[in-house]
């Protein structure tokens, strides 16, 4: 369970460009829930993920992961609870290390790390996990990651972020830089890992169709706070049109560009 209680993030405190980027944001995500996060540019989506990961300090409020207050812990201390995949396929892996070494490092992280001491057994286990990606990486264990395609690299990053079953998986437009086929592949893997590993996931996307189709719950952010929160049948019954309409109403006006703003 992830709990954010009245979380505030302010950039440029006291300066001419002071900005309240998260504003009294309260959100509880039960264990195993897959949440899609949408909202216009600058709404605070990445900052929300940064706040959970500990990459930005809180002005006030608390963040609890599985009941423990993480608010004052630095990013490196929270890393064992947090898996993260960013938009850039180059961001999550070490390009000058091999596929096997990248994954082996990730598998040793966190409270539920793989406890396999025998190198040959670990190697077999990791090879099997790589084979599940369906991208042929199990035959490229000794190749450096910078030889992989963007889609392969992002699939590997997702596996690395998920393998130790972190308390929360943070996905920031992680398929946006991929071609449609690879985006579909990585999305499918995401659904699978979240389901099979029982992960709690927050997935930011500008793809409203995907936000409706994927996950158990959808939240819409605007100006640093959650302005819509739907789950269950209401979410299933959503259409892109209704989502745009919801956004229009929360903004309190009628803007022709609403659809463009969200997407
Ligand atoms: N480190 C920072 N210092 C100052 N301002 C920042 C910082 N990080 C983000 N901001 C500002 O905070 C606001 C929210 O940014 P954020 O990246 O969270 O938006 P977002 O919802 O992820 O947008 P996008 O859809 O474009 O990725 C923006 O106005 C941004 O310029
Ligand atoms: Mg962002």
Image: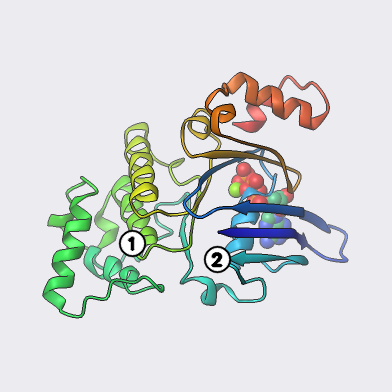
Q: In this view, does 25 lie to the left or right of 16?
A: left
Image height check: is 233 above or below 134? above
Where residue 131 appears, x then y in whole percent?
18, 52
- Crowding at dot 2, Cα within 10 Å, few <14 / some 14-19 / many 20+, comes out as some
Where residue 45 appears, x then y in whole percent?
63, 48
Q: Which of marks 1 and 2 is nearer the N terminus?
A: 2
The one nearer the camera, 85 or 233, is 233
Q: Is residue 170 left or right of residue 22?
A: left
Determine the CA span between mark 1 and mark 2. Answer: 18 Å
Image height check: is 96 above or below 235? below
Query: What residue does disc 1 label?
Result: 163
Comparing labels 1 and 2, the label whose residue is closer to the camera: 2
Do we see residue 55 in this rendering?
Answer: no
What's the residue at 69%, 69% (across, down)?
57
The secondary element bearing badge 2 is classed as: loop
Labels 1 & 2 near each other (Cβ < 8 A) = no
The image quadrant where one finds the C terminus is top right
Where residue 71 appears, x then y in whole percent?
66, 71
What colouring does the structure picture have? Answer: rainbow
Disc 1 under 8 Å from ligand 2? The reply is: no
Do we see residue 250 in this rendering?
Answer: yes
Query: What residue does disc 2 label?
Result: 66
- Crowding at dot 1, Cα within 10 Å, few <14 / some 14-19 / many 20+, comes out as many
């Amino acid at each position: 369970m992830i709990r954010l209680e009245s979380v505030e993030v302010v950039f440029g405190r006291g300066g001419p460009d002071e900005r309240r980027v998260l504003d009294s944001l309260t959100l509880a995500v039960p264990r195993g829930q897959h949440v899609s996060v949408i909202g216009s540019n600058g709404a605070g989506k990445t900052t929300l993920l940064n706040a959970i990961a500990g990459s930005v300090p809180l002005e006030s409020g608390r963040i609890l992961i599985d009941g423990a207050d993480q608010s004052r812990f630095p990013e490196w201390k929270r890393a064992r609870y947090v898996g993260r995949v960013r938009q850039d396929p180059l961001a999550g892996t070490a390009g000058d290390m091999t596929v096997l070494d990248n994954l082996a490092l990730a598998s040793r992280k966190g409270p539920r790390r793989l406890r396999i001491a025998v190198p040959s057994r670990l190697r077999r286990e990791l090879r099997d996990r790589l084979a599940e990606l369906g991208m042929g990486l199990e035959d490229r264990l000794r190749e450096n990651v910078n030889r992989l395609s963007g889609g392969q690299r992002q699939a590997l990053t997702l596996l690395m972020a998920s393998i130790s079953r972190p308390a929360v998986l943070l996905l920031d437009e992680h398929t946006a830089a991929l071609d449609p086929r690879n985006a579909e592949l990585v999305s499918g893997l995401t659904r699978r890992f979240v389901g099979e590993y029982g992960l709690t996931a927050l997935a930011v996307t500008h793809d409203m169709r995907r936000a409706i189709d994927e996950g158990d719950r959808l939240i819409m952010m605007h100006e640093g706070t959650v302005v819509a929160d739907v789950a269950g049948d209401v979410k299933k019954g959503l259409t892109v049109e209704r989502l745009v309409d919801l956004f229009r109403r929360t903004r309190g006006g009628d803007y022709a560009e609403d659809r463009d703003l969200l997407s």
